Every structure is written in structure tokens, then in C-alpha cells.
Amino acid sequence: MIPHGPSRRAVLGSGAAAVALSGRAEAAPSPFGPLGNPSWSADGLQAAAAVKGLAFGSAVPITRFRQDRRWRSLAERECGILVCENAMKFSSVVPREGVFDSVAADETLRFARANGQRMRGHCLIWHEGLPPWAEAILASGSASRAETLMRQWIGAMARRYRGTIEAWDVVNEIVVPADHRPGGLRATPWLAALGPGYVDLAFQMLKDEDPGASAVYNENDCEQKADWIDERRSAILRLLEGMLKRGVPINRFGIQAHLTSNLPFDETTLRKFLREIAGMGLAIEITELDIDDRAFPADVAARDRGVADLARRFLETVFDEPAVLNVLAWDLYDPDSWLSIYPARRRPDGLPQRGLPFDAEYRRKPLWHAMHAAFRGAPDHRAARRRLRAKI
């Protein structure tokens, strides 16, 4: 039985993965509603960003979103663009072969449209977030089966959400020079199954299905100062140059910006990196901003000052670049931060991390005020940003 209604879980029956991803998942797409009037408040982060041609937004944690009206109200007031935290990832949408579950993603998109907010898609091709049945196909040794899997997955998502997604993270976290693969590519199931051409292939597949969505390469650990990060930046630039030379339909580069207090931040280095990307004709997005505060004191006031100062320095540098369009935090609300849960990110003293703009009582923190001030003080690059938003 296939449940009906605007927010549905389509159980597509047994059979090949290609059927699960290409057939009935597309046949009856949910209506997502018209684009409503903007919901954000005049004193919020989105309002401050919009004056400079920028957009501010957040990842949406679906459980909090469903259970806590205060979180939804916060997103309505502060955000002009949203992205699903996990609800559009492969393992969430197709957890088992033959099942296409877009309920959470559809719900998030309807909320965004009702509030006049843009929506990002995250993420199509990633080395994590793979359901076991898809991992088995990629490990089968059959390049044709792997390519079919990719085509059906990207096609199903792009067709379902065509015309509603501003930008898709087509590939996510694909560079690790230490893996010693061609071009600095990370050793992933996709690379093993399809070779280095999987990256170009993914971008072309998205453009074939939704030419109106901006296609983004999203990457982590390229913002701060360390020898290994310098190596990553160089690999990223070489990769982007090669893609553009080959005519790959890429529009934007996404900088995750999971900033960390235990690494130095060098404005000159980041500014040069951004300028080089912009010089290729690409737009830039900050896609997952938060601050890992492990190296800051336990004292809340001191820690919040450190977090706010690092964010301010980063954003002031970023906003100097006219190619930067969007800034999204990886959630708004401290208690939900992955930084307090992920073992490698936990503070040594066991205290919860405070790397997001709102605290456990939904109060604006020094980080919020630093972000607001950075938006307000940013150079006015509205004309350049309008041109880049129109460039698909």
C-alpha cells in the first residue's frame, strides 16, 4: 500500500534499486505550496543580511523542528534560507531498498515556502550517509550498477524538488590529500566504484534533471591556518580549475565553516582563497557555520567572548568578498549542536559546547550579536550578488 497525502512515505515494493529510485518516487510528488510572504523580523539576522544582498539561514534538525514550536518561531524570525540537517541524505530518504521516504524533507520544504524562505539541498553524493544496500552496490565491482545507482538517486531527488531548491550540494567533502588518490580526492565508495570521473558525472546528472538549481561543491576544513589545511586548499583549487576546464556545470563552492578554537585563523590566507575561487567565476556559500569552543575557558562569559570574536573575524573577512551569497549556521540552538555529541569535538571538561547563536533558553548570545554586527557592517555588494544569483 502507498500512503496518500501531501506528506507521504512511498513504499515502492521489492525489486531493483533503480526501480525504487526512478519509478514511483517521482510519479506523485508532494505539493509544497506557494511561496509565502517573508516571515523574518526586522531585527533578526536575515533582515540584516538582506540589506547587503546576503541571506542568513540554518540547518533544520527535524526532531526539534517537529516537537518545539519555539525552534520553528526562531527559524521564522531569523532565517531567509533553510537546509535539511539530515532529511535529504541518501540513508534518510532510501533507508532500505524499495523504500523512498521524503516525509521529513517535504515537511521542511513546505515550512520554508510558507515563510518565503529559500531552500538548499544537502547532500547528493557523500562518503557517509549511505544506506547499506547502496554500499553493497558500490562494492559490487560493477561500474555500470554504480553509475545507475547514482543516476537514479540524483534524478529522483532533483525531479522531486525541481524548481524549489536554490542550490544543491552535489558532492560533499571529497578532498583528502593524505589519502594519496589522484587529484587529492578522498578514498570513498563512489571513487572506488566509478573512479575520479564520478565528480563530473554527479554535476552533469543534476544539471540534466534540474538546470535551474545552482550546483555546489561543498567542502570542510579549508578556513583556518595549518599546513594540512594549506594542502587541502591547494587541492581544492586544482580540482575546481580542472572541473571548469572540462566544462563541468558547477556554479558555487560551499565552505562549511565548522570553525575551531584550537587552530589559528589568518584573514589574509582566507581572503586570498576566496578571491581565487571568485576569480574562476564561481559564487561562494558558507554552508554549516558553528564554533568548536574546546580551547576556550569553561567560564561561560569568557567562552562566549572567544566564540563571538572568532566568528566576527571570520565573517568580516568573508563579507569583503562580493562572491559570497549565503551564510547558514549548522542549527541555531546550542543544545542540539553536533559538537557536544561527536566524540572528537567534545570539550575535555565535559561541558556542552556553546558554538551557536542561541542558548538553551533561546536567548541571543554574544555570537548572535557578533553575526548581526558583521552583517550590518559588511560592504554593500548587492549588485554583484544579484548577478551571481542569476548565473546558473
Image: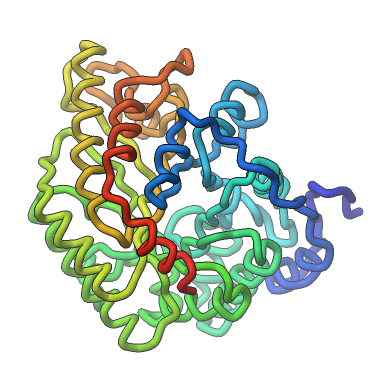
Q: Where is 184 relative to 371, above or below?
A: below
Q: Nearer the viewer, residue 214 or 147?
A: 214
Q: Nearer the viewer, residue 295 or 279?
A: 279
How far from the left and from the top, in percent, is residue 286?
35, 51
Q: Where is 291 relative to 219, above or below?
A: above
Q: Nearer the viewer, residue 300 or 343?
A: 300
Q: Which residue does the image show at 30% across and 53% down from the upper left?
A: 220
Q: Where is 356 relative to 2, above or below?
A: above
Q: Which residue does the image show at 11% across and 55% down from the upper left?
A: 269
How far from the left and from the top, in percent, is residue 265?
13, 43
Q: Which residue does the image show at 32% across and 38% down from the upper left?
A: 376
Q: Residue furthest bottom?
A: 246
> Total marks drawn?
0
- Can the viewer see residue 15 in this picture? yes
Whether residue 178 sits left or right of residue 193 in the image: it is left
How far from the left and from the top, in percent, is residue 368?
36, 27
Q: Quadrant of residue 148?
A: bottom right
How far from the left and from the top, in percent, is residue 307?
24, 28
Whether residue 237 sits left or right of residue 91 in the image: it is left
Q: How is the image coloured?
A: rainbow
Q: Which residue does the image show at 61% across and 50% down from the upper left?
A: 92
Whether residue 108 sits left or right of residue 234 in the image: it is right
Q: Nearer the viewer, residue 43 or 203?
A: 43
- Can the viewer see residue 343 in this picture? no
Whether residue 386 sits left or right of residue 183 in the image: it is right
